[in-house]
Amino acid sequence: EPEVTQTPSHQVTQMGQEVILRCVPISNHLYFYWYRQILGQKVEFLVSFYNNEISEKSEIFDDQFSVERPDGSNFTLKIRSTKLEDSAMYFCASSEGRSNEKLFFGSGTQLSVL
Amino acid sequence: AQSVSQHNHHVILSEAASLELGCNYSYGGTVNLFWYVQYPGQHLQLLLKYFSGDPLVKGIKGFEAEFIKSKFSFNLRKPSVQWSDTAEYFCAVNARSKNTDKLIFGTGTRLQVFP
């Protein structure tokens, strides 16, 4: 079965540093998403991306966050200046169509901000 | 605002016991409903989904869920659990009529099954 791949599996960074979380969606998928899960809390939607632009974003996704599909295969989430509260598991997801009917999640990147 | 409530935070069962995990959502329009499972150290996997039609949906690994519109509920059931069902279970809703494709998740239910 095709997979969404995320790297690294665990990222440790100092507060104020920039981090880039990488995802390789399934190759024929057109819709891309980032979600995050702070320890002990619910999985939260961050952003959706289609046709090389953000189609929807949550209140969490402020100016510190950006997404990019730099080369047609990778889908990245950048946090410009990390804060302690950015520590979370970040999940990438992709789907062929918009309906969530076949939405595939990656295994996540655990971001720890010290 | 849309929200999803999972009232059971931690459920402990013996093998062969029956399982029912509660899920309620708040949104008055048309919804798509999902249950995801996350096994230890693994990614979120879709167990089952409801988009339309028969409100009793069957998913993988013997799980099923029933959509009761009047109760805004989508409870997950399995008649006889196995040790391998130990995992975190997440209910999620997509407010289809709001022209959004984001999922709203519940806080999850941790299921532990003992042999």
Image (tube, rainbow, N blue to C red):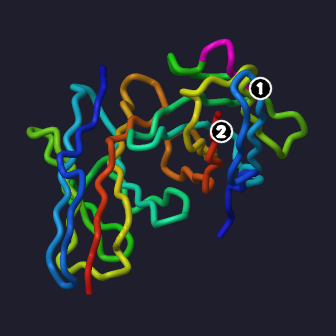
Residue with the most extreme left position: B70
Left or right: residue B95 versus residue A25 is: left
Q: Does the magenta stretch include residue A65?
A: yes
Three-letter amino acid code at the position of disc 2: Tyr
Left or right: residue A6 versus residue B89 is: right
Q: How crowded is mark 1: few (under 14 residues within 10 Å), some or many (20 or more)?
A: few
How far from the left and from the top, in percent, is residue B67? 20, 50
The answer for how far apart the CA atoms under marks 2 and 1 are is 28 Å
Residue placed most toward the observer, B21 or A73 = B21
Residue B113: numbered disc: none
Residue A17: numbered disc: 1
- Residue topped by disc 2: A31
Left or right: residue B39 versus residue A51 is: left
Q: Give the range drawn in magenta.
A: A62-67
To which chain does the residue with label 2 belong?
A
Left or right: residue B90 versus residue B18 is: right
Question: Image quadrant for the C terminus of chain B?
Answer: bottom left
Secondary structure, mark 2, is strand
Residue A68 sits above or below residue A96 on the image: above
Q: Residue at x 58, y 53 (%)?
A: A104
Q: Does the magenta stretch include residue B103?
A: no
How far from the left and from the top, in percent, is residue A34? 61, 36
